[in-house]
Every structure is written in structure tokens, then in C-alpha cells.
Image (cartoon, grey):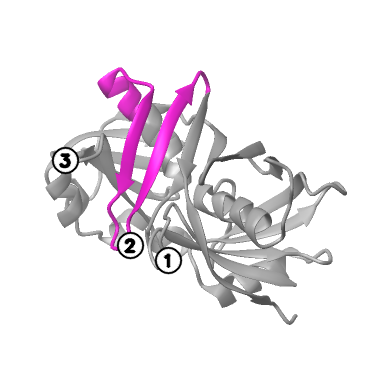
Amino acid sequence: MKSFIVDAFSDQPFSGNPAAVVLQNRQLDDESLQKIAAEFNLSETAFLQPLDSQGECWSLRWFTPKAEVSLCGHATLACAHALWEQCQIGADTLRFDTLSGELRVQRRGDGMSMDFPLCVTQSCSYDSWPASLTSGAVAAATAGEDLLLELADQRAVENFTADSAAISALNVRGLIVTARGEKHDFVSRFFAPAVGIEEDPVTGSAHCALAHYWQQKLGRDSFNARQISARGGNVGIAIHGERVVLSGSARTVLAGELLV
């Protein structure tokens, strides 16, 4: 099976968020998909199967090394990039059938834009959270499958020390940590140890919630955001009603065959 590793949300190799992309040439059971994801051992492995003869419509599933997830932005971007660059698919819009419904990715110049559902956030108390997580906290919110914690400034986000046991004890997919940025509208980091991701380099799905959170805070519909992990990556954001368009670039760093 054709397989690729793509660095998403970056125009340079070895930055952004790497995702594995596997083009299935036959139906695989869930156990096999999970084993392949564990073998790649990246934050996400995406599995594609064509749904039409033109290469416009695809079935798409995402797996971390430990579990299937319902939405993954960077691996979706990686899939679109691989289909266009490595498989020479001609359609300018790709449609993906996923657990989160139909997702669309469009080519836009040198980059790509993804049309995702906006994740509505709701303010919540963090008084009962482990103290190791809330030092310097300004506010907190629920964010779909995740929780969100706002800190005082970018430096606080950079210096945040993730207590994996405490984050796992929150009983959510992951924790988003965010603040106003120095050179970007806002910055963030994302931690999901419960699904095998100690820290995700760049998280498209988290920005579906971050978009709504900062829209409510700043009264704006578009943002230039950066996830400030060690690898780092930039995410363009534009909110349209109940949808959010996330924009970014990608680079293929490996192409080969999966021999199973």
C-alpha cells in the first residue's frame, strides 16, 4: 500500500506536524489499522480509500498509536497534500467522508484550506483541576472533546510544564493551553497523553475550538495563529457561521510502500 509521511502546517521539512498517510488497496479491519498506526508511532496515521473513480471523494479515518479519533486537522491536510502532490489527483476540491461528517479541502495558491465544523467553547471553572495545571491560569473552557486553559501571556504558554498524569485524570481527549501572542493573534500548545500524544506539534482540531474561544474574547472572525511546540506551525483561521476554515501548507518527507 502506498504510504507517505507529510509535515503539515509547515512549508519546510522537519517542522509542523508529521502525519502518516496510507492509501488502502483493500479493506482492513480495525485491529490492523490500529497496529499500523502504532508502527508509524506518529501522533496520527490517516487511512484513505477512494469512493469514486475521479479521485475527488475519499473515506478517511484517523488513528493515534492508541485509539481512533473523530477529527484530526493536520492529518487531513496531509492527506490532501499527498493526493495532490504524490498521486496527481486533478480535482481542486477534495471531499472526505469521516466520523465528523464530510470535510472539504481546497487548493489555494501554494497552500490549502480545510472547511471544518466550528467547536463551540463554554466557560467553566478550573477550581477542581489538579493544581499542577492551573498555576497562572486566567480562564478555562470546555472545548468539545477537550478542555481549554488560558494563561496570562505567550511566555507562560512557552514555559507550561505538562503533568501527563494530571491531564489524563481530566477524563478528556486533551488539554489546550493558550494565550494572546506576541507576533500572532494567539498561540497555543496541545497535550493528549490519554490517547498516546504527550504533546502534539500542531493540532488542527484544537483550532476549531480556539477559533470560537478567541472570537468571543476579541470579537473577530479571522486570526493568524501559531502553535508553539518545539516543531511549531502556523494556522490561518476564518470563521463562517458554524464552520471554520483552517489554512496551511505541507511538505512530503517520505514516500514508500507498506508491505502488509
Q: Which residue is mark 2?
A: 231
Q: Secondary structure at mark 1?
A: loop
Q: Which residue is mark 1?
A: 13
Q: Which residues are magenta?
A: 213-242
Which residue is nearer to you in this view: 92 or 155? 92
Give the numbered dot on residue 121. none
Residue 173 location (% of width, % of height): 45, 50
Q: Position of residue 155 (x, y in %)?
A: 13, 49
Circle 1 Cα neighbour tier, 10 Å, few/some/many (<14 / 14–19 / ≥20):
some
Circle 1: residue type: Pro
Residue extending farthest to the front is 109
| Quadrant location of the C terminus in the rendered image | bottom right
Out of 15 and 39, give the one closest to the viewer.
Answer: 15
Query: CA–CA distance between discs 3 and 1?
Result: 25 Å
Q: Nearer the observer, disc 3 or disc 1?
A: 1
Q: Nearer the viewer, residue 174 or 179?
A: 179
- Would residue 200 be seen by someone viewing this image from the given angle? yes
First in residue order: circle 3 vs circle 2: 3
Q: Determine which residue is flagged by label 3.
A: 182
